[in-house]
Image (cartoon, rainbow, N blue to C red):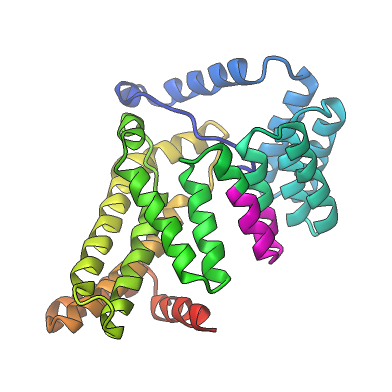
Amino acid sequence: MEPGARPLPWPRGWAGQGICAVVFVLVLSAMVSAPAHHALAQRELRLGDETWSKGEANAGLAHYRRVTEYDPGWAAAWERYGLAQHLSGYPKEAERAVLRATALEPDNFQPYHSLGRLYGLQGRLREAAEAHRTALARYPNNTRTWRFLGDTYRQLHDVEAAAEAYRRMVEIEHSPYNAYRAIEIDVDVEYAYAHYHLGRWAVQGYLSGDQPRGLETAMAEFQAALRIIRDYWGRAKATDDLYRAVGRPREDRAQQMTALEASVRWRMAAVHELLGDESSAAGERQRARKLAPGVEQTTAGEDAEEQE
């Protein structure tokens, strides 16, 4: 998803109306969400998103800069500009821009989420964790921020804090909040990452003797992750394709889900092997390698990173 962008709700009943429905939602959202912003600023923001998504980084950066000139009070524009600055190799300018966004909207979680993302990209992990916590104080149910916080703690080698972040995600998954969101045609894939890492650590707990039922727990977590991944392919991938078709491409979740499924299946193979089911273990390893030939190195790297 573009820097600072937010997913749009789409009632399930519109699914069969295709691209026209998505266009209507996008146009309506633009009318409702930013009526006060300068028309030229809105145009430059749209052009920035379009050129950036096409890989035209310099052009995108120029458009974002012009947005901040036309409408210097638009926090979302400063977020985009800051993240684009970082990706273009200007880290100090990037930080100043995103901090400007937090100053413009101090009660909004989104600028702090972007600040945490920026610090994470810069390797400033403790500052990233603090920014993510500040964002969550403003929006406690934002699963993407919880996942980034958990990932940041993993990079800091604080597995206990990371696990707590992922467990919080699972609590949100089973809460009335998520039941309400389930009416949307989109799928929150963030939960799959939480289940994956909790499954990994359950296996480690079993091997260390701390979790006698760790293999059972791990298998349940991995299966939960796979259910979410299958749900993405079943109904949300089409939503991503429609956004791309109307010129609003998101991040490549399809590629991410393919890589994650490979890792989940590789870990499941280890559980099957520990349970003495060599046939199932071999089958899962074959599926994992077919999805991502380098999955063995990827999963080994995850474990090694946490042990450093």
Q: Which residue is painted at 74% across and 19% down in the image?
A: 37
Judge by depth and name the residue closer to the eye, 264 or 19: 264
Judge by depth and name the residue closer to the eye, 186 or 15: 186
* Whether residue 209 is situated above or below residue 119 in the rendered picture: below
Q: Quadrant of the N terminus?
A: top right
Residue 114: x and y in percent read: 65, 46
Query: Where, by quadrant of the figure, is residue 292 drawn?
Result: bottom left
For the stretch drawn in magenta, the main secondary structure is helix
* Whether residue 286 is situated above or below residue 47 in the rendered picture: below
Asked if one can make out residue 290 in the rendered structure from this viewpoint, the answer is: no
Query: Where, by quadrant of the figure, is residue 269 drawn?
Result: bottom left
Judge by depth and name the residue closer to the eye, 268 or 142: 142
Please report the bounds of the magenta region as a residue range. Answer: 117-133
Magenta span includes 125: yes
* Whether residue 171 is situated above or below residue 68 in the rendered picture: below
Is residue 294 shown left or right of residue 214? right
